[in-house]
Image: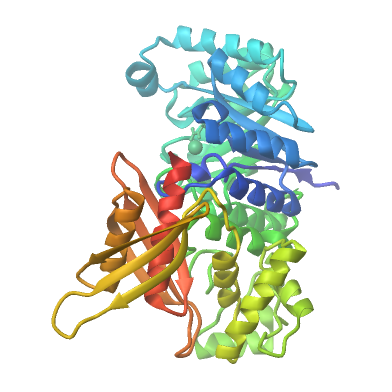
Amino acid sequence: MVADRVMIFDTTLRDGEQAPGAALDSQGKLEIAHQLVRLGVDVIEAGFPVSSPEDFKAVNLVAKEVKGVTVCGLSRCVKKDIDSASSALEPAERKRIHLFIATSPIHMEFKLKKRPEEVLEIAVEAVKYARQFFDDIQFSPEDASRSERDFLYRIIEAVISAGATTINIPDTVGYAIPEEFGQLIKDILNNVPNINKAVISVHCHNDLGLAVANSLSAVKAGARQVECTVNGIGERAGNAAMEEIVMALKVRKDYFGVETSINTREIIRASRLVSRLTGFVVAPNKAIVGKNAFRHESGIHQDGVLKYRQTYEIMSPEDIGLDKNELVLGKHSGRHALAERLHQLGFDLSKEELDRIFEEFKRLADRKKEVFDEDLIALVESTMRVDVEKWQLEGIEVTIPKDGLPTARVYLKFGDTVYSETAQGDGPVDACYKAIDKITGRPGRLLSYNIQAVTSGKDAMGEASITVDFGEGQVINSHGSSTDIVEASVKAYVNAVNKLNVKR
Ligand code: KIV
Ligand code: ZN
């Protein structure tokens, strides 16, 4: 028997990017979109075109450059949103519009200030209007899990009659419980007369930590599209994690009886890329992609795994693209080995970029016996993505007098001009941050600061992960790495200022 297929709708670039502190520029979005194609997702939701010129540009760029996938744009049930999505998605090989309007009593009364009948009419008119530009129309009754059933059935039936081809059921506030959410899908299938003309999709948030469980319960009940994000990033506590959904459907195919088109060996690359570009560090115990997900610590477990792997492993690291025969790189490694390793880590570099990285790699390998993956990621991060539209760190000088406050001079380049400022602070990092504030004129307040060694040994790379509040609700996460922790901290701060410019 041929298994049913569940479509993977990836919303990392839209809902994922809405995560507080995440900010992706259009180049970053494009890089992720290419990786999503390698991963084999069915639909990429690239953004919300009307929301900002940068989002419009990103959706348009993805639509232009990324082939072999459906590219989708989010839109309220408003003509100007639909027009904007239509022009942003114009160059796409396959395009979809995702229309949404809230249908729960609480959202209709307090947010939309509209009666249910008005909401229904607006939704139907929007779908009809969108039909002029799109054959592929997805409709979401926002906050569906808290909507009244009869109204939900009615609006779904009406938008399908108007031309919607996918009905997405969002658990917008992460309120549902798996059994109940699965039942909601069954009820929709049983109570909406024309539901066979559309695909049922689900979109679950993780406020109670149930996003993946709810999505899987919906699949069991008949949903045939799941919306998810890489590493589960998204609004508040995030969305259902793509890698967890996909691996659960694969490992428990005996239970779900469905397939996806995902090439799971690309999962780890996707996870690392999204973590690197959003600045969201993946927790070590995160399912599937956390550093510890395939590590066995206790003696009994190690013994069991050595005797027969399946005693404690329900999937293998190779399934998600972790290669157990990874080469150890050092100062005798050549360009080919470096290129191969970087490819496995999710970097697609041009020849010129590889030349630059190779130079830096040789310098690092002279200082370190073994160069680990984390060293390489940090190296590429600090060497590549040189953008004249962004601040770049040119140098730091720090003096720490025996009695008195440390003083820092920081040199930053923007375009062709190098700027420098001096400041004193409680410590060297504080002094550097104050000097940067003077240069950029964008003072930030540090909300969190963590430094950790990403490799082992005294010559380890240090990674600074910070959260900075630049005022007016602009909170940015970022990180930077170097073998010098002051430099790592400064890189993280400069990175945050650059992300702030994108977000604005
Ligand atoms: O969470 C939500 O309801 C959404 C909709 C736009 C689908 O993100
Ligand atoms: Zn959402």
Vertical arrangement, residue 119 with respect to residue 307, above or below: above
Location of residue 277 by image quarter? bottom right
Q: Is residue 251 visible?
A: no
Q: Position of residue 411 (x, y in %)?
A: 40, 64
Q: What residue is drawn where x is 40% and y is 46%?
A: 20
Q: Is residue 135 visible?
A: yes
- Front residue (pair 21, 5): 21
Vertical arrangement, residue 15 with respect to residue 191, above or below: below
Query: What colour scheme was applied to this rendering of the protein?
Result: rainbow
In the displayed structure, does residue 177 sit left or right of residue 378? Answer: left
Quadrant, the C terminus = top left
Vertical arrangement, residue 304 with respect to residue 52, above or below: below
Q: Position of residue 18 (x, y in %)?
A: 47, 41
Q: What count of labels does the image hold? A: 0
In the displayed structure, does residue 253 sit left or right of residue 29? Answer: right
In the current view of this chain or complex, which residue is farthest to the left?
Answer: 403
- Front residue (pair 471, 187): 471
Location of residue 489 by image quarter? bottom left
Vertical arrangement, residue 142 with respect to residue 433, above or below: above
Q: Position of residue 109 (x, y in %)?
A: 34, 16
Q: What residue is drawn where x is 26% and y is 67%?
A: 431
Q: What residue is drawn where x is 71% and y is 83%?
A: 327
In the displayed structure, does residue 111 sit left or right of residue 65? Answer: left
Q: Position of residue 454 (x, y in %)?
A: 48, 77
- Front residue (pair 115, 407): 407
In the current view of this chain or complex, which residue is farthest to the front?
Answer: 417
